[in-house]
Amino acid sequence: MGLNVLIIGATSAIATEVARIYAGQGAHLFLLARNEEKLHSLTGELGSTVMGYEAGDLNDFEQNEGRVERALMALGSVDVALVAHGFLGDQIRSENEFDHALEILNTNLSSAVSLLIPLANHFESQNRGHLGVITSVAGERGRPRNYTYGAAKGGLTRYLQGLRSRLYATDVHILNIKLGPADTPMTADHDKNILFGEKTKVAQSIVNALTGRKHVVYLKGAWNPIMAIVRNLPEFIFQRFGFLSGR
Ligand SMILES: NC(=O)c1ccc[n+]([C@@H]2O[C@H](COP(=O)([O-])OP(=O)(O)OC[C@H]3O[C@@H](n4cnc5c(N)ncnc54)[C@H](OP(=O)(O)O)[C@@H]3O)[C@@H](O)[C@H]2O)c1
């Protein structure tokens, strides 16, 4: 019997690769995403492994409980759920236009919380399941190049920490996937370096981690020690390193 898997933000470059891996394993999938055209093409590609799908803007918060309920109905129960959508936005714009800052905060934090409430309650009631959320290394320390996005992902990290503690005595596994830069449309205009993740490898690591035992994974793994340094550097030293504290 394949796993029942719900993927939210399924047309993200990374989530699409995750969906392909699960489909190859014979899982039953329910896919939620905003981009209708990409969603139709993905469900067409994955064929009968897709038990259902729905398109919609996840910043329509009031719709999200119903979306999760319909996914649960279609799958029967969920073994694995992945929350993958996100929005980097334009940092400088977010420093000047509150509406843009709010869109970044809503997409990366509020919409995720509106989905995690019904998902976590479902997992708690069935006393099992793996719930993974993609956050970001940007959430580890506020830096000029992405602190609005980082604030949202950092807030989401704290939310997941609390959720994990709430459900610790159950068999529900809460996984925070702290992603470093990866080569996807989100970073299309960024200079690439050796620390950039490749989407198929990142996706395979996500699938492995989702049913593994860890609560937090860094992808690539090299970000784990790097972020320990970034997190813990005293402010007066941090500010001297322009590649960390600059734009
Ligand atoms: N790539 C990186 O360097 C990197 C680094 C750290 C963390 N992450 C995180 O990794 C996850 C996957 O991103 P990715 O790299 O695969 O980038 P991506 O291909 O650009 O995917 C982002 C996805 O989020 C969706 N999305 C944005 N706003 C939405 C909304 N209001 N409602 C519904 N869907 C919405 C987009 O939908 P549309 O197709 O409709 O625009 C898109 O499918 C995200 O959570 C991202 O924050 C990425």
Image (cartoon, rainbow, N blue to C red):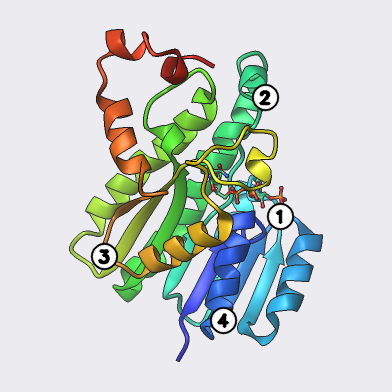
Residue beneath disc 3: 213
Residue sitting nearer the eye, 239 or 117: 239
- Report the Cα–Cα distance between label 4 and label 3: 22 Å
Tag 4's secondary structure? helix
Identify residue type, mark 4.
Gly
Q: Is mark 2 within 8 Å of ligand 1?
A: no
Residue sitting nearer the eye, 110 or 35: 35
Residue 147 location in percent, x, y? 49, 24
Residue at (33%, 15%) from the top-left corner?
238
Q: Residue furthest front?
A: 194
Mark in front: 3 vs 1: 3
Q: Is mark 1 within 8 Å of ligand 1?
A: yes
Assess whether mark 4 and mark 1 are in contact (beta carbons under 8 angstroms). Answer: no
Residue at (37%, 10%) from the top-left corner?
239
Mark in front: 1 vs 4: 4
In the rendered image, which quarter is residue 224 located in? top left
Residue beneath disc 1: 34
The first of marks 4 and 3 along the sequence is: 4
Residue beneath disc 4: 24
Identify residue type, mark 2.
Asp
Tag 1's secondary structure? loop
Residue 68 location in percent, x, y? 55, 65
Residue at (68%, 45%) from the top-left corner?
185
Residue beneath disc 2: 99
The first of marks 2 and 3 along the sequence is: 2
Q: How many marks?
A: 4
